[in-house]
Image (cartoon, rainbow, N blue to C red):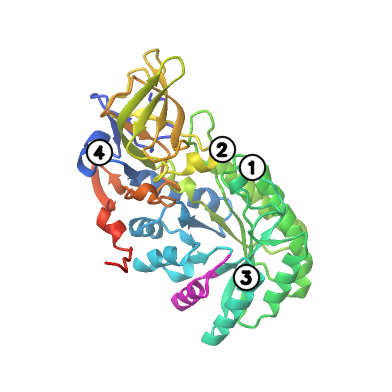
Amino acid sequence: MNPFSEVLPIDSEVGPDGHLYIGGCDATELADRYATPLYVYDVHTMRTMCREFVHQFGSRYPNSRALYASKAYLGPAMARLVAGEGLGMDVVSGGELAVARSVDFPPEDIFFHGNNKSPDEVAEALDYGIGRFVVDSFHELEMVGEMARQRGVVQPVMLRLSPSIDAHTHAKTTTGILDTKFGFPIETGDAAEAIRRALKTSNLDLTGIHIHLGSPIFELEPYSLGIDTVLTFLAPFRAEGLELRDFSPGGGFAVGYVRDQLPPPISAYADFITRAVRDRSRDLGFAEPRLLVEPGRSIVARAGVALYTVGGVKDIPGLRKYVSVDGGMGDNIRPALYDARYEAMLANRVPDDPSGGDLERVRIVGKYCETGDILVKEADLPSPRTGDLVAMPSSGAYGISMAGNYNMNPRPAVVMVEDGESRLVRRRETYDDLLSVEMDPGA
């Protein structure tokens, strides 16, 4: 059994030639055809994860809906896949909305998040007829209400509340505490004031409440505590006209980036969350609301593998061996930004015994002009050499979507694979692409 099987796409395997195969495609042939750096997404894994969320939550709580948190990774091909699997979509920008619109994603299934939506973004979303704004500030509450009035529509909204609960994740991805830019805090009185204002705004229909505690969340208890805290807080507002039709405990479902830290199964998240919503609703006398969950990284992370070609190898005897690849923080900033950990393997020569003694401990670094451009601090590989193909599993979330052009490097291509076939869904950027947005008044 391949020891990386729990972090690779579901149907990955090692062929008799010692090559890694993803979705029936030889990773080395993909690298030869499309060049590296290259992001490879396995369609079967993404569909399986979509269906798992729909089944695990729907079988326990029929009035539930999974919404794909598109910030994890989005393009037209991904939007079509999500729609085809019956999921709704969360967007957080006009650009993400534009992708959804490009494939005629059902507008009623789009939920618009974000702490500082612009007037243009609000107008675009209203004109497309999106299902919900998830309102994050008093400024936005007033703006959406006024722009809805100008159009003669009543816009459904949810309010994002901050319950001051620490989900014990990275400080930069913790979002449910008091000291964060997101949401109306309960303990300051802002949440209560926001509910009252929304109920009194004639062109807004307050359908429910949203919370999000952070990401990735490996523990189950924070969800239960958040649900209990918020539903208890909301109970008195029924007398003021609040009808809780929608409730979202957010997303943040963890994934296995490394073999020594694997997440609970989706069934465990579903069991914990649905029981908490149902039990607390019953205790407080609420009619059970529609339950909205927001998987993003948990849909695409495992499905994606990043492929890089080894260039220089620098050996400092007695200290460390550096293996430089042709990508880095420009296409995956998570290790530099969050100290995120990944596994690594040689896709062109997977050893018969990856836990054997013929391995070297190396550091995989990128090509960008930063000492902190480190992809994997410690990887055990079979004597990496120039021309080898490095594969980083579980790279499908937030790599491409957070990619940039530092050092004026073009962003990589993306391919989707299924049943031994590959298709290019995002071409590699060119130097002409980079220069096309520049203006030279002196030319």
Q: Is residue 309 left or right of residue 213?
A: left
Q: Earlier in the sequence, mark 4 or mark 2?
A: 4
Q: Is residue 113 left or right of residue 10?
A: right
Q: Which residue is mark 3?
A: 207
Task: Decide: is 370 above or below 133.
Answer: above
Q: Residue at x 48, y 70 (%)?
A: 108
Q: Nearer the viewer, mark 3 or mark 4?
A: 4
Q: Which residue is mark 1?
A: 220
Q: Nearer the viewer, mark 4 or mark 1?
A: 4
Q: Is residue 131 on the magenta stretch?
A: yes
Pointers 3 and 4 in contact (C-beta within 8 Å): no
Q: What number is the disc on residue 51?
A: none
Whole-number angstrom distance, CA of label 3 to CA of label 4: 48 Å
Element at label 3: strand
Provide the residue span drawn in magenta: 116-132
Q: Residue at x 76, y 61 (%)?
A: 233
Element at label 4: helix
Q: Position of residue 71 (x, y in %)?
A: 47, 55
Q: Is residue 284 left or right of residue 248?
A: right
Q: Earlier in the sequence, mark 3 or mark 2?
A: 3
Whole-number angstrom distance, CA of label 1 to CA of label 2: 8 Å
Element at label 1: loop
Q: Is residue 386 left or right of residue 52?
A: left
Q: Which residue is mark 4?
A: 31
Q: Residue at x 70, y 70 (%)?
A: 194
Amino acid tagged 3: Thr
Q: Residues within 10 Å of mark 4 (few under 14, many from 20)?
A: some
Q: Earlier in the sequence, mark 1 or mark 3?
A: 3
Q: Which residue is mark 2?
A: 264
Whole-number angstrom distance, CA of label 1 to CA of label 3: 26 Å
